[in-house]
């Protein structure tokens, strides 16, 4: 099966972002992709919470998502919107990933579990949880001969999620992201390759790239990694584009047979705290 990672430079206007996505999906379909993943915050890359409140649409009847469903049906392919903000009753948002089937219907959704809350030396504290509510469940979905495991951006730093997905049958891990340039240069490839190696799974990572209307700069470098940890396709830049690779479920079987880490894993007691 051929799969595609779509790289974007999303801005503040959902309709403009959707217009930018349409030709990229057409390019992926023309290349033979049966599944296409878009980046985190595909349809709106907000500057702040107030801006989110002014443009984020409810999940039911969401106008841009309805159009994405039409595009999935038009191309006869799975289209996976990496994420978009969905308003919740408590005033926060879900960072939600949405998978459409080739029939245009929604096949699965996932809300980002891990949120970036940090006090960084020399910078103001960053509290993603002030704007977003964390998801509470891992999600998989059938995708032809593969089982897709869902994650979003910061999730990639938490191996236990991917171990759980793999043990639930996932053989292809989706990682839509909007990585900053410094963390992308330092950690992007090594983290994604590690997630592929430790689970014996394919990893597809669709990234935001370039300078955005909200003032941020993102790393790009969307890529596809095989179950042995080899990068088999990459956009080696931060501009919009499409990268396609063919994947084979037999490669997952072979990688997990050669290094049976999932089968060999054991529960263990945590160390005692030293007083």
Image (spheres, rainbow, N blue to C red):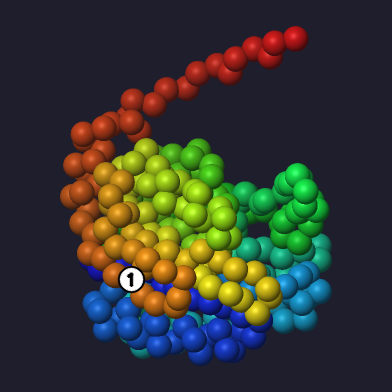
In this rendered view, identify the residue nearer to me: 244 or 253. 244
**Residue ID at (68%, 14%):** 273
Q: Quadrant of the C terminus?
A: top right
**Residue ID at (50%, 43%):** 161
Asked whether the viewer can see residue 165, the reply is no
- Is 15 positioned to the left or the right of 268 in the image? right
SS category of the residue bearing label 1: strand
In this rendered view, identify the residue nearer to me: 207 or 21. 207
**Residue ID at (74%, 46%):** 120
Q: How many numbered marks appear?
A: 1
Q: Quadrant of the N terminus?
A: bottom left
Q: Which residue is mark 1?
A: 243
Is residue 41 depicted above or below 199 in this figure? Answer: below
Is residue 230 depicted above or below 67 in this figure? Answer: above
Residue 255 percent location from the top left of the image:
23, 41
Asked whether the viewer can see residue 23, the reply is yes
Quarter location, residue 102: bottom left
Residue 92 percent location from the top left of the image:
77, 64
In this rendered view, identify the residue nearer to me: 236 or 38. 236
């Amino acid at each position: 099966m051929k799969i595609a990672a779509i790289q974007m430079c999303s801005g503040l206007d959902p309709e403009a972002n959707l217009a930018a996505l349409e030709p990229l999906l057409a390019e992926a379909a023309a290349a033979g992709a049966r599944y296409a993943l878009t980046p985190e915050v595909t349809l709106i890359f907000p500057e702040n919470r107030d801006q989110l409140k002014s443009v984020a649409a409810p999940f039911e009847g969401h106008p841009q998502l309805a159009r994405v469903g039409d595009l999935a049906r038009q191309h006869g392919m799975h289209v996976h919107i990496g994420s978009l903000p969905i308003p919740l009753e408590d005033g926060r948002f879900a960072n939600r990933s949405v998978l459409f089937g080739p029939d245009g219907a929604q096949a699965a959704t996932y809300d980002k579990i891990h949120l970036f809350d940090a006090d960084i030396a020399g910078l103001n504290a960053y509290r993603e949880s002030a704007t977003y509510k964390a998801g509470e469940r891992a999600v998989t979905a059938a995708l032809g001969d593969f089982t897709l495991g869902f994650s979003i951006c910061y999730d990639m730093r938490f191996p236990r999620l991917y171990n759980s997905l793999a043990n639930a049958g996932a053989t292809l891990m989706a990682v839509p992201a909007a990585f900053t340039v410094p963390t992308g240069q330092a950690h992007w490839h090594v983290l994604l390759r590690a997630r592929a190696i430790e689970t014996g799974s394919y990893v597809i990572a669709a990234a935001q790239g370039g300078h955005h209307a909200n003032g941020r700069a993102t790393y790009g470098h969307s890529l596809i990694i095989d179950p042995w940890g080899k990068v088999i396709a990459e956009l080696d830049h931060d501009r919009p584009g499409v990268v396609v690779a063919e994947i084979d479920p037999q490669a997952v079987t072979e990688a997990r047979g050669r290094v049976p880490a999932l089968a060999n894993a054991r529960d263990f007691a945590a160390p005692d705290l030293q007083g």
